Amino acid sequence: MPIWLKDKIFLKRNIKEQVAKIGDISIDEVPELLFSEHHQSHAASAFFSSPFEKASILCLDGVGEWATTTIWKGNKSEMELDWEIDFPHSLGLLYSAFTYYTGFKVNSGEYKLMGLAPYGEPRFTDLIYQHLIDLKADGSFRLDMSYFNYAAGLTMTTSKFSKLFGGPPRESESTITQKEMDLAASIQKVTEEIVLRLANGIFQEHGNDYLCLAGGVALNCVSNGRLLREGPFKNIWVQPAAGDAGGALGAAQAVWHQFYKNEKESFSGERNDYKDLMQGSYLGPSFSNEQIEIFLNENEIQSLKLEDDGLFEKVADHLDEGKVIGWFQGRMEYGPRSLGNRSILGDPRNTEMQTTMNLKIKYRESFRPFAPAVLFEDVSDYFDFEGVGPYMLFVGQLREDQLTAIKLEEKKLFGIEKLKIPRSKLPAITHVDNSARIQTVHSETNPRFHKLISSFKKKTNCGVLVNTSFNVRGEPIVCTPQDAYRCFMRTEMDFLVLENYIINKKDQPVVAEDESWKQKFELD
């Protein structure tokens, strides 16, 4: 409240003063300021970017102004709030409470909890339902706040929470035990059940065939995958920048459509149609070959320039050899996922690739899964997945014919030991539950990345690559050629591709190791 009273209450006046200063006008001449509510921005970013003309909208996050869960009806340029659940009762904050208790960082470590869940058993679900949450048939819920401290204190959970689950929160960076894995599995299962109930309730209330999702909880791709498979809707669409970073887009769209009444463009909305208004989410800055050449020359960086066909063939050769490639091209992705323009790539058939990329490239926990980038036309050859997934927001299972038999002694392994089991023909992207976070790559939205994977397929008969974000743990995804080269030199990547220039690590100068850069950003 002190921060709110000091800053927020004068926000409108402060903005007007700054705009007047920039425009060299009086404060009275500043045009009308328009403010979009937090969940309105989430909902607008989902519906107005989606392919649907008419849809229900579900927004789930920690908290906006007061709302934590909102349900909307979208129709052309109109969007109407139906009902909401308010703070402190929040699915996002419930999930974050378990993120905190299992020793990960709130607001960035939730995806680790999701990735850890398949290593555990959901043995705490009954405790969660009995003590923490009162869940109704329609998905509405209330939390027992005596277990949570986020509304009034500086931690997420209380001593009562710790007593319920048998001890204090795990210390950050300490050993992850079976207990943390089981807690992750339990809260993941509860989250999926809540989302499914909400979706079923919305479907019965609205009767719409389509659903849009936004808010931080909408980045839970395991829940999304289950909703797509088991939910009542013909299709669902998730805003790729579903977290708060997407709020700027949503605020602009709310003004454009709701205030100025501009019509929304719509497409078929069918599951096999890639078309929406996000253009593959490639909305960030790009750098030409000429700009990259200037950077390389100024820094005396040895490189080889190749035309596209030769470049794709060369990179495919290196990937087949087990090399790790930093891949930088086109416009940067908008949202938290690298989608083939700021990516680190590897061979999914390589049994050592997951561990290598986690420990030697990303400097992060070995259990973290990697996503497959798969040619859209080939997705059904590898995965039990219907439709498109260009934004890496749905988890699907690998096909039975892609799986390999697990030996008797391997079946006895528990926890992180499960990581050692090669489960499929694509072990680097197969999680311990035989699932994968799928990115379908389309020639229409990313022709160069599509051609690279096609070149790899031509060489290896495999239309899939490992695709992870071009950064190390704790740092943002690289944006500029300078960012990419710096990250490349600090890790054990083998080659860096900057548009049409390929850089071999062996040709670069050996520099004295200085790891002070690891302290620049707090670990996630």
Image (spheres, helix red, strand yellow):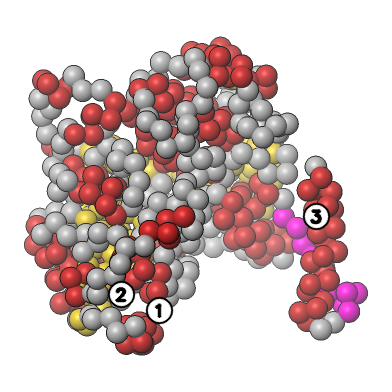
Residue 32 among those drawn in magenta = yes
Mark 3: amino acid: Asp
Percent across and percent down for residue 43 are 61, 49
Question: Which structural element holds mark 1?
Answer: loop
Q: CA distance from mark 2 to mark 1?
A: 9 Å
| Magenta segment boundaries in residue numbering | 26-36
Could you tell me residue 473's position as x and y percent? 40, 51
Quarter of the figure with residue 501: bottom left
Residue type, mark 2 in image: Leu
Q: What residue sits 38% from the left and 55% below the top?
A: 472
Looking at the image, residue 252 sits to the left or right of residue 34; the answer is left
Is 29 drawn above or below residue 441 in the view shown? below
Query: Which numbered tag is attached to residue 7?
Result: 3
Q: Residue at x 52, y 22 (%)?
A: 168
Which residue matches tag 2?
A: 498
Q: Are marks 2 and 1 in contact (CB under 8 Å)?
A: yes
